[in-house]
Amino acid sequence: MSKVYLQAAIDIAREAGAVLREEVQRPPDIAYKGDFDLVTQADRRSEALIVSRLQTLFPEHAVAAEEGSGRETGSEYRWHVDPLDGTTNFAHGYPCFCVSMALAKGGDLLLGVVYNPIFEEMFWAARGEGAHFNGKRMQCSKIGELRKSLLCTGFPNTKRHTLPNIHYYWDFTLHSHGVRRDGSAALDLAYVAAGRFDGFWEFGLKPWDTAAGVVLVEEAGGKITDLDGKPYVLGGKSILATNGLIQAEMEKMAAEIKKKESVQV
Ligand code: IPD
Ligand code: CA
Ligand code: CA
């Protein structure tokens, strides 16, 4: 994997992060994509910057960006871009949001970068080169039991009443140290990679939410599947990301919840 791609992703994420830092000082300019699905001026400004930098540096690469300004080029290289993951947090001034960028070649994820511009926390990973946090190697936690784990999850902004996650939230809360709900899937995955959380699950995430985080977790020694224990595909119905050690226990509990609650996903 070319170091040029990784350095570009780190530099661009920092630059887009500076835009978010500037925008968060202003009253948010909120529009709605759905009943509770927010988009702000900051999402658009950050995305415009990222897409334009990628266009200049790698004009042949395809770009899939959340707010729709990406491009199809027919290239086997594809950037997955979330210019602001955690928009609801951003709009309320809750400092848990980030820029998330990943590069795939022919469907294989090569690298991922997640940057929280408020805490100036940079997480990056590249295939075979490990996962890194602010210049140092990072590893998933070594906690091997669900009952001693700190977990996280998220709830989608769309079709909220039809999703079954509250059942999973309830049962996993009763069988762990607790379940956090921070509102940024990309940061949730980065935190699993950094050993802050031991496991994360969610339903209905999009490729730009998870692509970077998947590389981070895998390169930090963790495991990613869907909630049924099958291989995770970007944009799949569910994701389960753990330190690897509690994966089997979480899969087992997810299967029990699914059966008990007759969950259809
Ligand atoms: C959202 C966040 C949130 C997750 C939602 C996503 P956005 O992304 O990742 O944690 O629960 O499903 O849509 O809209 O803030 O980019
Ligand atoms: Ca997102
Ligand atoms: Ca977003």
Image: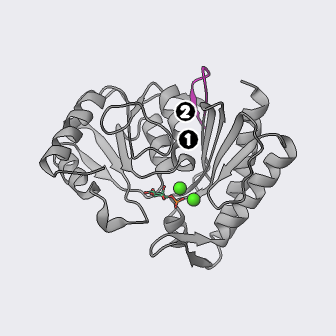
Q: Amino acid at mark 1?
A: Ala
> Residue 259 magenta-drawn?
no
The residue nearer to you, when weighing 27 against 218, is 218
Q: Label 2: which residue?
A: 215
Q: Which mark is residue 219?
A: none
Displayed quadrant of residue 222? top left
The residue nearer to you, when weighing 248 against 130, is 248
Range covered by the magenta-colored residues:
125-135
Q: From this viewpoint, is residue 48 visible? A: yes
Secondary structure beneath label 2: helix
Q: Residue at x 52, y 60 (%)?
A: 86
**The N terminus lies in which quarter of the figure?**
top right
Label 2 crowding class (10 Å Cα cut-off): few <14, some 14-19, many 20+? many
Residue 91 image point, x, y percent: 54, 72
**Does 167 appear above or below 150?**
below
Q: Amino acid at mark 2?
A: Val
